[in-house]
Image (tube, coloured by chain):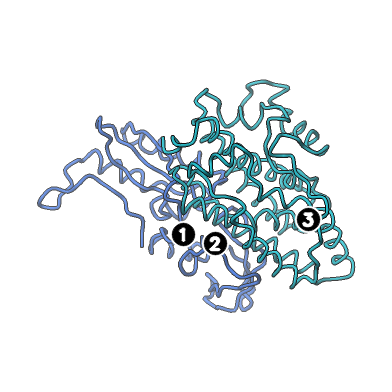
Amino acid sequence: MSAPIEASPPDAAGKIVDLELARALEAASAVPDPEVPCVTVADLGILRSVDRDADGAIVVRLTPTYSGCPAVIAIEMAVETALLEAGIDARIERIIAPAWTTDWISAEGREKLRAYGIAPPVGASGGRRAFFAEDVIACPRCGSSATSKISEFGSTACKAHHRCDDCAEPFDYFKCI
Amino acid sequence: MDAATATQDTAFQAIIELADDCLILGHRLSEWCGHAPVLEEELALANMGLDLLGQARALYAHAGEIEGKGRSEDDLAFLRRERDYRNCLLVERRNGDFAATMLRQLYFSAFMQPFWRAVAASSNDEILRGIAAKAEKEMAYHLRHSGEWVIRMGDGTEESASRMADAVTELHRYTGELFLASPARADAIAAGLLPDPDSLRTEWDRTIASVFAAAHLTIPEVRVPQKGGRDGRHGEDMGHLLAELQFMQRAYPGMSW
């Protein structure tokens, strides 16, 4: 369930014809998240689209993870810079609807998070959950499912803090929202 | 504009009420920085405050666009007088101890989580629906976190239980204002911009009753419910809060980081 990234429509042979747009998509997709640098903005699904507006200008649309995420502006600047370095002048737009969900983190992104030591979100996003309900979060180091929640809120808005009861390693869990 | 059916001024005022609730409570939570009982709660309080400030920013920016007078989110957050803030009294109440802060968060998030869900489902304003869809998830988190603390403390030691009971006595009288619609809000409801807060009363009552039952707390009878914030009539805590919140912009007008 990765994020749908819109590139220019391919021609009949399935070949992308707008090369500048393809390069823009490539440059924007490769920008790492400033707080979780093991994944890119494309992996996280916060890069929503790269396409051309009616006047032919390249528009990159990004969406924030949390309302108050302090990295929003840093991410927008990083994407703009990456595009400038690729020689592409693009407009960055912030979109808030539809709201970002962890369901948009790609399978590749989830594996990168785990390899980096951050447990990826478990299950599909939902609404309200029961008090004291505990999800089974596998330790990203040893794989054990005997883990405990230390705090609902971790080092950034998008993470919670857990500990492995088997290997004793504390780790971040990418909250499922 | 999607909100065209509500008058511009009505829509602006109704959204400002929501933004002010988020800003003022977010600011209150930020006052805990460096004072929380444990490191994990330090992070939790700052994180919840950040969510609320983020919601406030999006709401102010949207209100400013609807108003169409060129006021930015910063102008609205920092450069109004006390009587122009339309937050409910609950959110401006001084933090008190950790019990009072968590109870206030429970009261607020038990209302706002279903409120945002209703906005996301039924508002005719696309931007509000987007803000709401994100805010609902954040408030679900706050509700769970604060509800668990109210249960832990109410069902905890003699000391924690008595502090939580004191917090209930102090704060419950402010909760009725959450369900009242100001004239601007009533217009916004009629225009399909926002849901009627009174329609969320049953769900809020049910949430609070279930938490209080687990926490061995009694829902008090409120003889004199407190209200006034939606008309700009605030308690004495509000001026002190604004003095700190607005200091930089008042002392150094137009300064930016």
Which is nearer the eye, B167 or B243?
Answer: B167
Chain ID for label 1?
Answer: A
Q: How many marks?
A: 3
Name the kind of residue labelled 1 in the image.
Thr
Q: Secondary structure at mark 3?
A: helix
**Residue at position x 57%, y 35% from top?**
B60
Chain of the residue that carries numbered disc 2 in the rendered image: A
Residue A59 location, quadrant? top left
- Chain that appears cyan: B
- Residue B36 located left or right of residue A44: right
User: Does any portion of residue B88 appear in the rendered image?
Assistant: yes
Q: Is residue B66 left or right of residue B185?
A: left
Tell me the element at label 2. loop
> Label 2 crowding class (10 Å Cα cut-off): few <14, some 14-19, many 20+?
some
From the image, state the color of chain A: blue
The amino acid on which the numbered mark 3 sits, given as a three-letter code, is His
Report x, y in % for residue B198.
Answer: 62, 53
Q: Which residue is mark 1?
A: A102
Q: Which residue is mark 2?
A: A175
From what the image shows, is residue A135 above or below residue A48?
Answer: below
Check if mark 2 and mark 1 are on a common chain: yes
**Pointers 2 and 1 in contact (CB under 8 A)?**
yes
Please give the chain letter of the residue carrying mark 3.
B
- Is the same chain shared between marks 3 and 2? no
